[in-house]
Image (tube, grey):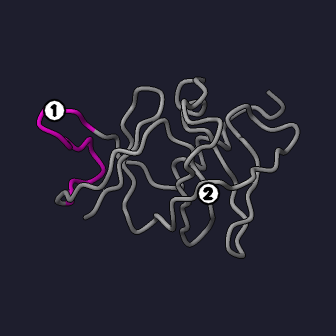
């Protein structure tokens, strides 16, 4: 399977490429009140509404280094749409199916934690609102 890898708060995160809709930039994020700090707001992109999450804040409460004009990884899956702001986009890697365990993606032995969009959404849903 193709894995899309990005970095957030010092963690490498991999998502199956089938969930990646687009990489967007120069998009206005509309803030939403009384949501967790990692929830940046909403964007309207090519006819779709996406919730936008700062992955650095979601993972470790650290603001993304791309915060001024970030690239936004747009995900679409059967139950939702989500935009992720990473610190850095690493790239694509082909891996054999491994049941969702960590995947080595370079010669230094760095690993990416495989996540699904539902896992990211559930992590967000478990946070306190208005923080």
Nearer to me, 72 or 104: 72
Mark 2, residue position: 82
Nearer to me, 85 or 70: 70
Query: What secondary structure is marked by label 2?
Result: strand
Q: How many marks?
A: 2
Q: Residues within 10 Å of mark 1 (few under 14, many from 20)?
A: few
**Magenta-tinted stretch:** 97-111
Look at 54% across and 68% down and name the residue there.
77
Query: What secondary structure is marked by label 1?
Result: loop
Q: Quadrant of residue 31?
A: top right
Q: Quadrant of the C terminus?
A: top right
Q: Tell me where residue 21 appears, x and y as whole percent.
A: 51, 68
Q: Is residue 70 magenta?
A: no
Look at 76% across and 54% down and name the residue there.
42
93 with respect to 84 (left or right): left
Query: Residue placed farthest to the right in the image?
Result: 33
Of the two numbered discs 2 and 1 on the same chain, state the one appearing first in sequence: 2
Vertical arrangement, residue 60 with respect to residue 80, above or below: above
Query: Residue placed farthest to the left in the image?
Result: 107
Q: Tell me where residue 125 appears, x and y as whole percent.
A: 68, 44
Q: Tell me where residue 1 appears, x and y as whole percent.
A: 25, 64
Q: Tell me where residue 100 appears, x and y as whole percent.
A: 30, 50
Q: Residues within 10 Å of mark 2 (few under 14, many from 20)?
A: many
Look at 57% across and 58% down and name the residue there.
24
Query: Residue placed farthest to the bottom in the image?
Result: 47
Mark 1, residue position: 109
97 with respect to 66 (left or right): left
Vertical arrangement, residue 49 with respect to residue 72, above or below: below
Prevailing secondary structure class for the magenta stretch in the rendered image: loop
Query: Distance of mark 2 from mark 1, alpha carbons?
Result: 29 Å
């Amino acid at each position: 399977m193709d894995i899309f890898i990005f970095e957030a708060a010092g963690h490498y995160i991999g998502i199956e490429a089938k969930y990646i809709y687009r990489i967007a930039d120069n998009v206005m994020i509309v803030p939403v009140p009384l949501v967790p700090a990692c929830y940046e707001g909403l964007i309207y992109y090519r006819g779709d509404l996406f919730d936008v999450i700062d992955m650095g804040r979601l993972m470790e409460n650290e603001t993304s280094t791309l915060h001024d004009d970030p690239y936004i990884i747009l995900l679409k899956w059967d139950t939702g749409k989500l935009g992720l702001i990473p610190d850095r986009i690493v790239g694509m890697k082909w891996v054999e199916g491994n049941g969702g365990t960590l995947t080595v993606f370079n010669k230094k032995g760095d690993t990416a934690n495989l996540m699904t969009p539902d896992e990211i959404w559930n992590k967000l849903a478990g946070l306190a609102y208005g923080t």
